[in-house]
Amino acid sequence: MKKRTISLLSLALLGAMVIPGAAFAEEGSVLNVEVWNEEFKSRITDHYPGYEEVDATTGKIGDVTVNWIITPSDDNAYQNNLDSVLPGNVDAAADEKVDIFLVEADYALKYVDADANVAMPLEELGITADDLGKQYQYTKDIVTDANGVLRGSSWQACSAGLIYNREIAKEVLGTDDPAEVQEAVKDWATYTETAAKMAEAGYKMAATVNDTYRVYSNNVAGPWVQDGKVVLDDNIKAWVDDSKAAVDAGQTTTAELWSDDWAKGFFPEGKVFCYFGPAWFFNFCLHADEEGSVAYDGGWGFVTGPQSFYWGGTWICAAQGTDNPELVKDIILTMTTDNAVMKEIAQVDADCVNNTEVLAELSADDSGNLALLGGQNPYEMLAAGAENVDMSNISPYDQGCNEEFQGAMKNYFDGNADYDAALGQFKSAIVEKYPELTTD
Amino acid sequence: MTSNKKSRITSYNKWGYIFLIPFMVVFVVFQLIPLVTTIYNSFFENYMSGLKQVGPNFIGLKNYVQLLTQGDLLKYFKNTMIMWIAGFIPQILLSLLLGAWFTNPSLKLKGQRFFKTVIYLPNLIMASAFSMLFFTLFANTGPVNSILVNIGIFKEPYQFMSHAGTVRGLVAMMNCLMWFGNTTILLMAGMMGISDSLYEAAEVDGATPTQIFFRITLPLLKPIFIYVVVTSLIGGLQMFDVPQILTNGTGDPMRTSMTLIMYLNKHLYSKNYGLAGALSVLLLILTGILSLIVFRTTAKDELK
């Protein structure tokens, strides 16, 4: 009942004149959605009015069957899948057509490319700039093609910060107050000093060197690839030097992100002081539902950290050739512009939503307090961060470059190679992935 | 009369060809055509850049030149051979020993069927699952490390995946474990084909079991032995799944456990059919040469 009200309200607010069901009748009967995990599916299940779950990979919106095609990102499988289906999507059989696909920041430029033309311009769906007025500019920059045409929309603003373990902060720094903890990690020099204290007390500062990578790589002076040549930015080099020193001093490890060794710090016995992440990290990674985890007991705190950065985010794109344009339009508008729905997402899923009005509301009172952060309200910080994100240095090669660089440097950190040899391995890996690039 | 006989022969021949059809069809569709197209593709520049197709443009032997001059082909070949040999030597020794025991009539081993099944079992597990299992076992926070730390052998968990020796060793060990059962069965088949009268004669003449093994079993086992070495070599050159899963496709540390096929797989990220095709052709030639060398050296006597 409540959802129905929200739905009607949102439609009224948007001035849309369509009513679900009736207007979609002449559209395709199957909505195929390409995703790499369960995140968007659970957002739709919980927050999209009128969505009914049928089983793990199907649902219904009115008469339309929603088909979730989940291909994990591992080994590039998700993109390989998109690459094989999207170019021929216009000519595919009606029920086989992809209607919605999701992309991440690291490779968004590949799919919103004007020549590739696999993501529909939002204008063609009837979504105007006014509709998206409350979204943060950077979330639009990522999915804008070279001609300035917008081809995607996100419900998340993924400005990120430093998430610290309050217990450890109390023990080593003598306080768990965010303002004072921020003082101890305000820049890389003080961060390193704090890391030394942590190591002395038997704690790792961060779980792995790869935790800090995004913080450095977001604050570069130029993109990875300039005129077809791979360019190593000074700030990336700074990450290498700082990380090598930290590994040698026993302040962190070289485990891979997402590995068990990395995730052990989500529990008290993992002895890890901090992680770096945006709001989705709270909900998606910290094992907040699991008894005994630090998050379950509200043991985390959130501060800006040494440098502001963003990480990830999911954008919704309408696939060129979709036979459900009205439904796709409604999903995009509801999930990425509707205040009521987005506030609900923020409160239920601890997501930082891409909506200036909602974030202002959340930071103004206690409604944005998060239990897993010990009742701290992170939204003011997240909103301020989102305003400052600068996307001018992204390139379509970011994903490959970031992955290969971290992978190659692991050898240097582990002492299996000197810096030049590790850099050499990075370069040969890049040429394998992107034969059109040069490295010297 | 003669014409009658002749026609019967031809009609038999016809059946021979008819029975060959299924094999030939499968061979042509799944082996010959891919082989020819691979060679054809290796002369083209042909890859994807994002969603854009580059090529195919005919570039002659450029792919081969690039592979032989720029890449670390030799290094990956060396890695492959090291891991294969390190796994094959213990494997063949173990198999010979087990095969000799199982076929020795004077030992009368009990429960032979059971043990033959058990040693073959690792081969039934998918290589990737087996590899994943070892990855978990030998992770920094895995059970092997916690045992080693708890009984006091190491103070800190040993990073198995960050040392060339241990990664290669693990790959070799897994290959050995997975294949020694198969090799044992093959060698046993060879050993059982050796006439008992030879063994009996040797025993009557007072030969020791060691003498029997080295003077009778081994020489007569040679044809099967060569078959085992050549098939294992070809399998070894195509080593992929175990190190790929164990190192998450990186071949780390510093690509010291990257095999030729893992390197080939790296080119498939950009669907670089040209370069990958050239690499496959080189691999084909290499396999041919190595098999020939093995065959020539081990089968010297027969060829004379």
Image (spheres, coloured by chain):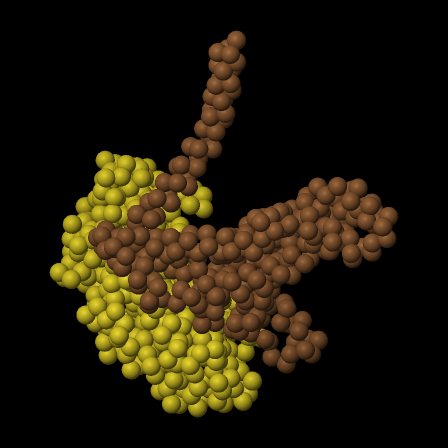
Q: Residue furthest left?
A: A147
Q: Residue at x 78, y 42 (%)?
A: B196
Residue A398 position in % (x across, y down)? 30, 67
Question: Can residue B292 be seen in this snapshot?
Answer: yes
- Left or right, A254 with respect to A102, comes to right
- Image hue for chain A: yellow
Labels in figure, total:
0
Residue A343 position in % (x across, y down)? 33, 62
Front residue of this view, candidates A119 and B58: B58
Residue A349 position in % (x across, y down)? 40, 62
Front residue of this view, candidates A157 and A76: A76
**A211 is higher (above) or lower (below) than B249:** below
Question: Can residue B50 be seen in this snapshot?
Answer: no
Q: Residue at x 36, y 66 (%)?
A: B71
Q: Residue at x 48, y 29 (%)?
A: B20
Q: Residue at x 48, y 60 (%)?
A: B244
Residue A377 position in % (x across, y down)? 38, 74
Front residue of this view, candidates B192 and A418: B192
Front residue of this view, candidates A185 and B258: B258
Based on the displayed image, in which of its 4 quarters is residue A211 positioned? bottom left
Image quarter where the C terminus of chain A lies is bottom left
As drawn, the chain in brown is: B
**A20 is higher (above) or lower (below) than A128:** above
Q: Residue furthest front?
A: B304
